[in-house]
Structure formats: structure tokens, C-alpha cells
């Protein structure tokens, strides 16, 4: 497994460079495809990248945007990643993009899993994926110790899985490792010394202990303090 590690002098420079890189990859793919897909992480870390991307000139009306994972909460919740996506990425020029949702109104993700997966299947393979990584080496909602970890890592995994993990207050729904790893272009965003050390620690570990390793091959890792 090999990946490229890019270190930046600060987070602002990282955000600008990474947004430009993602936009360039989307443009190149649009030269050969009618539509392309962009999968992104939730949380606040990618916010500045979203801000830069949303102001970028691109044929956004030919881009499908989706999250790599989502908490099973409505958009009215402050814990909704979809809410953050609408506020930071699907605005400005990028408002023309199509959102492929990872949440629908139901008590559990299992009730809506098939419908949500069907909409995503037509957007595969993913054109560009941007992933985060936790200090515990999870990515998307593929957590060490999660109830469906082995299924999410399997080469025969479905597109989407519900996921429940220790310490996660609500159920999650996540794209599985083969879907994320099958993207035409992969980027991983990490900040700070703790996560850089965690990435080093992941070397040589099985994906069951370090789920990030299931998607790292041929990826570009972007790091700033």
C-alpha cells in the first residue's frame, strides 16, 4: 500500500490547494463523462475547503454530491452533516449540484437503506472522494469495534450500511470501504500532531484495527498542524 503525503504550512493554504485540486479533477472527469460524483466528509474540518469549492466555476449541474457517512438525525439537528453540507458547500456556484441524500425520515436507517442505496448506485464509481480520519483510525463511519465492521470492509460489501459503534450516540449510515476505495481519485484530510501520529501508527495494521487502511492505497493525504 502506498499513498502520497502532502504537508502544508497552514490550514488556509491546505484548504485553497485541496479545493483547487478537487475542482481540477472534477473538470477533467467531466470532459469524459456526462456526470461525476463527489463524496465528502461531515464535521467542521472540511468547512474551509467547502467554502473555496462553492465559489469555484465548474459545471456543478453535472455533479452529484454526497456524504461519505451521516448520523441518523434530521437536517434540523445540529448534529446533521447534511445541514452543514448545505450551508458550506451546496451554496454559491455549487448550489447547482445535486445532493444524493444519506438520510430519509424514519426511525432507523434500515427502513430507508434500499431506497438511499439505489440513488447512489447510479453515481458509481465515485469520481472524487474526500475522507477524514479519526484518532482511532476510523474513516467515514467505519469504526473499529462497530457492529458491521467486517461487512463494511468486505470486498462484497453493499453500497451502504447502517453502523452502530461504541461511543456514537445515534446510529450512522456509511458508504462501505469498497465504494470509497473504488473512487477514481481519493483524498484524506487530517489536522494536528495527534492524527499525524495516528496515521503513522496505522502502518502495517489490518483494516479491522485501522479502517483507514482500507482506503489509503493510491490516496493523497493532506496534513497541516
Image (spheres, helix red, strand yellow):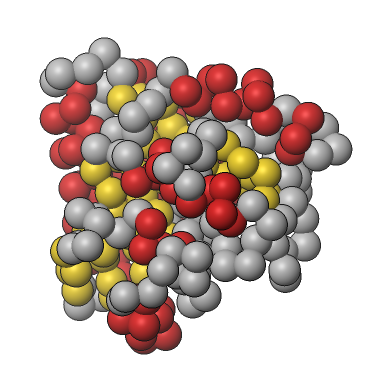
Q: Position of residue 122 (x, y in %)?
A: 43, 18
Q: Quadrant of the N terminus?
A: bottom left
The residue under the point 31% across, 76% down is 203
Residue situated in front as seen by the camera: 76 or 176:
176
Compared with residue 84, is residue 222 higher up or lower down, i.e. above or below? Answer: below
Residue 187 is situated, as x and y percent measured from the top left of the image, at: 29, 54
Residue ranking furthest to the right: 107
Residue 195 placement: quadrant: bottom left
Q: Which quadrant does the C terminus fall into?
A: bottom left
Left or right: 210 in relation to 174? left
- Residue 215: quarter of image: bottom left
Q: Quadrant of residue 24?
A: top left
Residue sitting at x 28%, y 49%? 186
Q: Is residue 187 left or right of residue 162?
A: left
Nearer to the camera, 50 or 69: 69
In the rendered image, residue 11, in percent from the top left (x then y), is placed at: 31, 70
Asked if residue 137 can be seen in this view, the reply is yes
Horizontally, is 206 left or right of 36 in the view?
Answer: right
In percent of width and height, residue 79 lies at 69, 55
Q: Is residue 105 something that shows in the picture?
A: no
Identify which residue is drawn at 19% across, 48% down. 21
In the image, what residue occupies the spot 35% across and 33% down?
126
What count of labels does the image hold?
0
Task: Specify the farthest residue to the top.
Answer: 34
Residue 41 lies, with reference to residue 156, above or below; the image says: below
Amino acid at each position: 500500500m502506498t499513498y502520497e503525503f502532502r504537508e502544508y504550512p497552514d490550514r488556509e493554504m491546505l484548504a485553497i490547494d485541496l479545493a483547487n485540486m478537487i475542482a481540477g479533477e472534477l473538470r477533467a472527469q467531466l470532459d469524459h463523462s456526462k456526470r461525476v460524483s463527489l463524496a465528502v466528509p461531515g464535521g467542521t474540518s472540511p468547512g474551509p475547503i467547502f467554502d473555496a469549492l462553492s465559489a469555484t466555476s465548474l459545471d456543478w449541474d453535472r455533479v452529484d454530491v454526497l456524504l461519505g457517512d451521516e448520523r441518523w438525525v434530521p437536517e434540523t439537528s445540529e448534529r446533521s452533516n447534511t445541514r452543514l453540507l448545505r450551508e458550506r458547500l451546496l451554496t454559491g456556484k455549487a448550489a447547482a449540484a445535486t445532493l444524493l441524500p444519506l438520510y430519509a425520515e424514519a426511525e432507523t436507517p434500515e427502513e430507508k437503506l434500499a431506497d438511499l442505496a439505489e440513488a447512489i448506485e447510479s453515481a458509481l464509481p465515485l469520481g472524487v472522494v474526500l475522507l477524514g480520519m479519526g484518532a482511532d483510525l476510523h474513516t467515514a463511519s467505519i469504526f473499529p469495534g462497530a457492529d458491521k465492521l467486517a461487512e463494511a470492509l468486505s470486498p462484497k460489501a453493499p453500497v451502504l450500511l447502517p453502523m452502530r459503534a461504541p461511543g456514537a450516540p445515534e446510529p450512522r449510515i456509511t458508504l462501505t470501504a469498497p465504494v470509497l476505495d473504488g473512487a477514481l481519485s481519493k483524498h484524506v484530510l487530517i489536522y494536528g500532531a495527534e492524527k499525524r501520529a495516528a496515521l503513522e501508527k496505522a502502518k502495517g495494521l489490518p483494516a479491522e484495527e485501522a479502517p483507514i487502511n482500507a482506503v489509503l492505497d493510491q490516496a493523497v493525504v493532506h496534513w497541516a498542524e
